[in-house]
Image: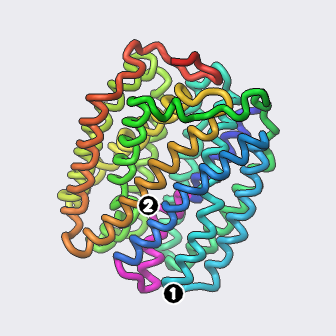
């Protein structure tokens, strides 16, 4: 399968995220939603990541139809999102977001499995394909920042609907991957989940994503209330993802040189610095620029490490469920916790205090990593389709 087809899907998928993450909360604020209501809508969007990826992964593993599930989920996500055009009040919006997110959030973990299987023993090249998703995010955040300034935030649903349709079209271009041997199709993941380092790693990723809660939910609103224009807000979001692209290019070499543990420890230290810079340095553009560059570690290196870790432990027919578990525990449960706490903390404590809590969360993740996660200390692991059992 040509790598450009995989890259095209990532570009379309993350372009939709480049519209959704920076501007969705601003659109909800435009509709008159309060900070707790915005937090609840974002939380519901994250909540579906707990159930949907695992349910779809279970079906895909049993039927050996990962690509078919990606295509069906992409199509149903686009169709269900179209209901946004006819709702504007809080409860109907919650219902539409729940339906749309159930399909949209199930797609990416399945596609990660397809990508890693296609790469085979070149799994360390994952970052070089995934970076096209980051490029899609950057371009969309920049363009939409200008469009919002020129027109209005009310154009957002139209842009998102077109992007969700593009995801479906991109999925049609992907060739059917090789099947995992059926004789292994009912392998249990229970023994893997009982390993202390796996439990610790899932908890660490939950805390990492929880810490991103105020950033994903209120960063744009925070900047706009401080006086930043829409185009500059788009630039700041894009800078973070450009830094992420650079780190994805470097990660294959870094994984060989330093290994999972050392990269993760440094990433968590710098993540805490990032949240403090945003929380207490919003009036200073240079500090905000520095904080956005640190997105390379608060998300980029942490995500690349997580993909390799999951691929290392969840082998063969358990890969899809491993990716789904990572998504549901981190982006799902962690995202829900982050969106909910940030919504209420933002209103009751203030912006700086909310980001301070985020810094505490990643420092807790750092302590857990230091004590429990020692995988890859020999720096020799490069993910393959079927790595040896530990």
Q: Check whether the beta carbons of the residues at disc 1 and disc 2 lie within 8 A of each other.
A: no
For label 1, the residue is 89
Q: Confirm whether residue 191 shows in the render.
A: yes
Q: Is residue 130 above or below residue 313?
A: below
Instruction: Please say whether residue 34 is one of the residues in the magenta stretch.
Output: yes
Task: Residue at 50% x, 62% y: name it.
Answer: 47
For label 2, the residue is 234
Quadrant of the drawing holding the N terminus = top right
In this picture, which residue range is highlighted in magenta? Answer: 17-35
Q: Residues within 10 Å of mark 1 (few under 14, many from 20)?
A: few
Q: Position of residue 88 (x, y in %)?
A: 54, 85
Task: Residue at 62% x, 69% y: name it.
Answer: 99
Task: Residue at 35% x, 32% y: name it.
Answer: 264
Q: Position of residue 109 (x, y in %)?
A: 61, 45
Q: Secondary structure at mark 1?
A: loop
C-alpha distance separating marks 1 and 2: 27 Å
């Amino acid at each position: 399968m040509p790598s450009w087809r995989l890259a095209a899907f990532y570009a379309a998928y993350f372009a939709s995220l480049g519209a959704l993450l920076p501007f969705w909360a601003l659109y909800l604020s435009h509709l008159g939603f309060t900070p707790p209501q915005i937090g609840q809508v974002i939380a519901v969007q994250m909540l579906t990541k707990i159930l949907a990826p695992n349910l779809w992964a279970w079906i895909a593993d049993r039927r050996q139809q990962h690509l078919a599930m990606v295509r069906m989920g992409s199509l149903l996500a686009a169709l269900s999102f179209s209901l946004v055009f006819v709702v504007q009040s809080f409860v109907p919006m919650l219902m539409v977001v729940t339906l749309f997110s159930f399909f949209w959030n199930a797609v990416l973990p399945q596609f990660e499995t397809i990508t890693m299987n296609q790469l085979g023993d070149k799994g360390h090249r994952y970052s070089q394909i995934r970076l096209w998703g980051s490029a899609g995010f950057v371009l969309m955040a920049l363009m939409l920042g200008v469009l919002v300034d020129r027109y209005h935030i009310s154009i957002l649903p139209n842009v998102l609907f077109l992007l969700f349709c593009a995801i479906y079209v991109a999925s049609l271009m992907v060739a059917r991957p090789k099947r995992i041997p059926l004789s292994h199709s009912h392998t249990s993941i229970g023994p893997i989940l009982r390993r202390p380092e796996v439990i610790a790693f899932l908890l660490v990723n939950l805390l990492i994503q929880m810490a991103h809660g105020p950033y994903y939910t209120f960063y744009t609103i925070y900047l706009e209330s401080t006086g930043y224009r829409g185009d500059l807000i788009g630039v700041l979001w894009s800078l973070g993802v450009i830094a992420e692209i650079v780190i994805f290019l470097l990660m294959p070499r870094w994984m060989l040189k330093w290994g999972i543990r050392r990269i993760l420890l440094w990433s968590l230290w710098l993540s805490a610095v990032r949240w403090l810079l945003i929380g207490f340095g919003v009036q200073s553009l240079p500090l905000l620029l520095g904080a956005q560059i640190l997105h390379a570690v608060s998300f980029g290196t942490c995500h690349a490490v997580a993909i390799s870790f999951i691929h290392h432990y969840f082998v063969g027919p358990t890969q899809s469920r491993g990716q789904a578990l990572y998504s549901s525990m981190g982006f799902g449960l962690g995202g829900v916790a982050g969106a909910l706490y940030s919504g209420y903390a933002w209103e009751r404590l203030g912006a700086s205090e909310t980001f301070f809590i985020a810094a505490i969360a990643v420092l807790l993740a750092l302590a857990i990593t230091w004590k429990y996660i020692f995988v890859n200390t020999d720096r020799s692991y490069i993910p393959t389709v079927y790595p040896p059992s530990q």
